[in-house]
Amino acid sequence: QVQLVESGGGAVKPGRSLRLSCAASGFTFNTSAMHWVRQAPGRGLEWMALIWFDGSNKYYPESVQGRFSISRDNSRNTLYLHINSLRAEDTAVYYCARDGDGWTSWGQGTQVTVSS
Amino acid sequence: EIVLTQSPGTLSLSPGERVTLSCRASHSVSSTHLAWYQQQFGQSPRLLLYGASNRATGTPDRFSGSGSGTDFTLTISRLEPEDFAVYYCQHYGRPPFPFGQGTRLEIK
């Protein structure tokens, strides 16, 4: 079955960087576009990044342009999100999700906490 | 940029009741790319409906969706205990893939 497993979260100080990973299995990863979505404590869902199946195109909301970078390694079936210059407002659970007609597959999330 | 507004914010209901949740878009959107998700406390979102009215695999038939243009609804015909959760609508046609702010269903 489809499985997405995020990792790489943790407690970090403001201004630092972090790389999140999402290990995919159970489907043909190299034909699927992928997303990152975050959820701040007690808040709703917020889309963070999209990467095409082959990595040729990447999209971000304006709010994180220049600080967030999505990438993928199709040989390792792994999706990444690199976050620079972390801020307190980046504190959230970060989910990866598989693109499709509706986003059917989501990981369990990885918690990122930014605090001095 | 499309903004999705869900109403109400919170609903207190009893098992067995029927409920309709609303999702209103700031501009007309294609129903082809309108989805509804359910999120239980502490869990990941789960796709319920896509294309406004198509049930995802595993979605019980008590869940139905409708709408077009700027107004969309999710209806649960008869609430089961496991339906008390937060529901989000989303337009997934193109970036920035907005989500509504969510509607919380609480047990009365």
Image (cartoon, coloured by chain):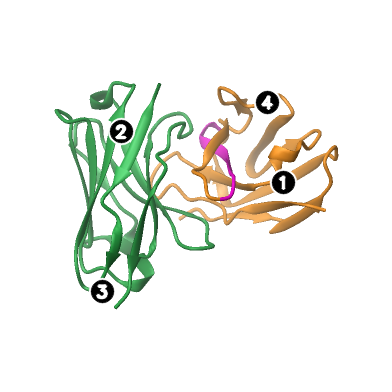
Q: Which residues are magenta?
A: B32-41
In the picture, measured across the screen, residue B31 lies left or right of residue A114, that is: right
Q: Which residue is mark 2?
A: A33
Q: Are marks 2 and 1 on the same chain?
A: no
Q: Nearer the viewer, residue B60 or B52?
A: B60
Question: Mark 1 or 4 closer to N-term?
Answer: 1
Task: Select label 2 or label 4 by which is in front.
Answer: 4
Q: Are marks 2 and 1 in contact (CB under 8 Å)?
A: no
| Mark 4 Cα-neighbour bin, 10 Å: few <14, some 14–19, many ≥20 | few
Quote the CA–CA distance across marks 3 and 1: 39 Å
Q: Are marks 2 and 4 in contact (CB under 8 Å)?
A: no
Tell me the chief SS of the magenta region: strand
Taking the magenta stretch, the answer to whether it contains residue B33 is: yes
Q: Nearer the viewer, residue A49 or B27?
A: A49
Tag 1 subunit: B
Q: Which residue is mark 3?
A: A14
- Give the vertical position of A87 relative to A46 (above or below): below
| Mark 3 Cα-neighbour bin, 10 Å: few <14, some 14–19, many ≥20 | some
Q: Which residue is mark 1?
A: B21
Quote the CA–CA distance across marks 2 and 3: 30 Å
In the picture, measured across the screen, residue B89 lies left or right of residue A62, that is: right
Residue A32 on image: x %, y %: 30, 28
Taking the magenta stretch, the answer to whether it contains residue A83 is: no
Task: Select label 1 or label 4 by which is in front.
Answer: 4
Q: Residue at x 69, y 38 (%)?
A: B82
Quote the CA–CA distance across marks 2 and 1: 30 Å
Quote the CA–CA distance across marks 2 and 4: 27 Å
Q: Are marks 2 and 3 in contact (CB under 8 Å)?
A: no
